[in-house]
Amino acid sequence: MTQNVHFSEEGKQIEIPDKKANYKSYIILGGVVVILIIGLFIWAPWSSGLYNKYAISKQMSVTERGESAGVLTKAAELYNSGDYTAARKIMQTEYMSNPQDPLLSYYFSITLIKNSQEHEARTVLKKLYEGESAFKYDAAYYVALSYIKQDNKKEALIWLSKIPQGTPNYEKAKELSGKL
């Protein structure tokens, strides 16, 4: 900061701060603050924070029998350990041969969301929602979460409103709607 030097009547040296230099410092500081705020909104860490906070299917449980039981057990182990990429690869192969399996469809769609393939996940989840499986309203909930992950609050609210009172995820959906 530049300062002006003056002398008092007694001959003592007095330093007076340069007001223009002070003003420039405040402008630069203000610019940095604005850039940080804009960066925060672009990054939007609360979007994934809401997704992670409100995700409901933390663990995959397999009770399947038959030929695919071993394969799905391996996929469940990978899913439960957080290796969603490897789990998705196994589940995708199984899903292609049996897209009517609601359990497989549900967890496969979640692995798609975890792998940032939200559009593909919504395709699978919407089929579940349109059907009569036990995962109908869980599917609607995860469609909403997929939109939240992409910071699309409008679509998320539409899907959260499809979860009726009395269903297991109603209270979470209501709370989440309030945060959006």
Image: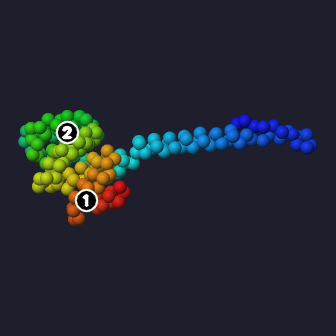
Q: Nearer the viewer, mark 1 or mark 2?
A: 1
Residue at 14% x, 48% y is 127
Label 1 crowding class (10 Å Cα cut-off): few <14, some 14-19, many 20+? some
Mark 2 belongs to which amino acid?
Ala
Front-lying residue, 175 or 16: 16
User: In which quadrant is the N terminus drawn?
Assistant: top right
Q: Earlier in the sequence, mark 1 or mark 2?
A: 2
Write down the residue under mark 2.
75
Residue 167: image location, x then y, percent: 21, 61
Seen from this angle, which residue lies furthest left?
66
- When asked about the image quadrant of residue 24, the answer is top right
Q: Is residue 48 left or right of residue 87?
A: right
Q: Is residue 50 left or right of residue 138?
A: right
Marker count (numbered): 2
Real-space Cα separation, disc 1 to disc 2, in angstroms: 32 Å
Residue 41: image location, x then y, percent: 43, 45
**Residue 145, label in figure:** none
Front-lying residue, 39 or 70: 39
Write down the residue under mark 1.
161
Residue at 29% x, 55% y is 157
Residue 14: image location, x then y, percent: 83, 41
